[in-house]
Image: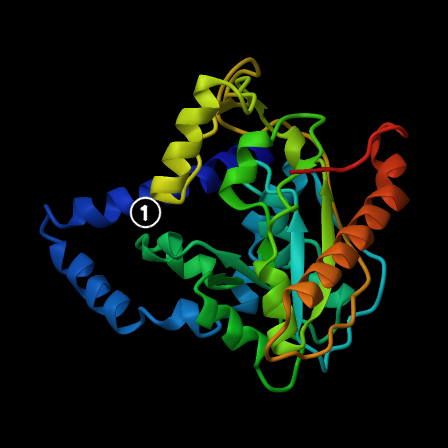
Amino acid sequence: LSQNKLTQIFIYRLISLVVFIGLLFTRFWFFSILYSIWWYLDRDKPQQGGRCSKALQSWVMWKHMRDHFPISLVKTAELDPSRNYLAGFHPQGIMAPGAFVNLCTESTSFSSLFPGIRPHLIMLPFWFRVPFFREYLMMGGESSQPWSIAHILNRKGGGNPAAIIIGGAQEALNARPGAYTLLLRNRKGFIKLALLHGAALVPMFSFGENDLFDQVENSPSSWLRWIQDKLQKTTSFSFPLFHGRGIFQYSFGFIPYRQPITTVVGKPIAVQKTLNPSQEEVDQLHQRYIKELCDLFEAHKLKYNVPIDQHLDFC
């Protein structure tokens, strides 16, 4: 049952777009027109905190998605609900189901583990332009424009972490089973954001996130990677050539393998608000963040079948 439900979730994005366009050519065309008007009037909502719905976050579909892998969430420290946070999620993987299930839904009991905390998973603006699909993304997602993230970090009352998948689309090109290479060495924009808003940094590592798909070999010096890098820079999307299992067989398809995913939430790193941070201040905090992330990985890797001699690599 869980495999069938998961398949439904992954194809919903395509179906929602097909239905929206298809209705325009039927006698029910006015539904698409009405929705278009709604979408236009509601277009700024993804930049203003989304539309949190506990009922939608608790939908049984997400529990089926959780159980397919399965996906779990581990807490290592308290998060003060009077503070706002900037959380870094690693690694990107191919589809980042660990980030979606743990941070956008209640299927792993996030609100019970972290009372008073409502996470916002930062996503590309494109996803909020897909008809119908955008509606359930907004239950825990937020657009990646700078002013949108600032809106989260400046919200009064606290309890709002902006969770950014730091490696992003480019890091997906490194995702394959057993890979622990993170695109972080020169990613410092999130560090500057944390300093500007005085938001504590929270490192998160998702064990198993890279084990869900196989990917065609694309070393940094290969012609395939050259093409992929060019496409990513042009479109903001990466195009990894990956495969998992099929719906009715296990040898080939685009459904992720059933591999456990465990997202470990690290302890917050206090950040002093600095309106004009120097490069030295950014670099120092960046180095501290990397150290805390490495410590988190090393402290938990043996529990999740990572070899003792395996360490994080940064590029």
Q: Residue at x 83, y 30 (%)?
A: 310
Residue drawn at x 58%, y 26% is: 213
Q: Is residue 241 left or right of residue 16?
A: right
- Extreme residue in the top direction: 251
In the image, is 99 to the left or to the right of 247? Answer: right
Q: Which residue is mark 1?
A: 16
Find residue 151 and report its horizontal and vertical position in percent. 50, 76
Which secondary structure lies at badge 1?
helix
Q: How many marks?
A: 1
| Residue 197, position as x, y percentages in the image | 61, 77
Q: Which sits in the foreground, 159 or 10?
A: 159
Instruction: Say whether residue 137 is left or right of residue 165.
Output: left
Camera-nearest residue between 314 and 210: 314
Quadrant for the C terminus, please.
top right
Q: Can residue 260 be seen?
A: yes
Front-most of residues 1 and 300: 300
Is 224 rendered above or below residue 49? above
> Residue, x 71% and y 35% (percent of image)?
208
Q: Position of residue 253 (x, y in %)?
A: 49, 21
Q: Is residue 50 visible?
A: no
Dot 1, crowdedness within 10 Å: few (<14), some or many (≥20)? some
Question: Residue 40 in the image: x percent, y percent?
Answer: 24, 68
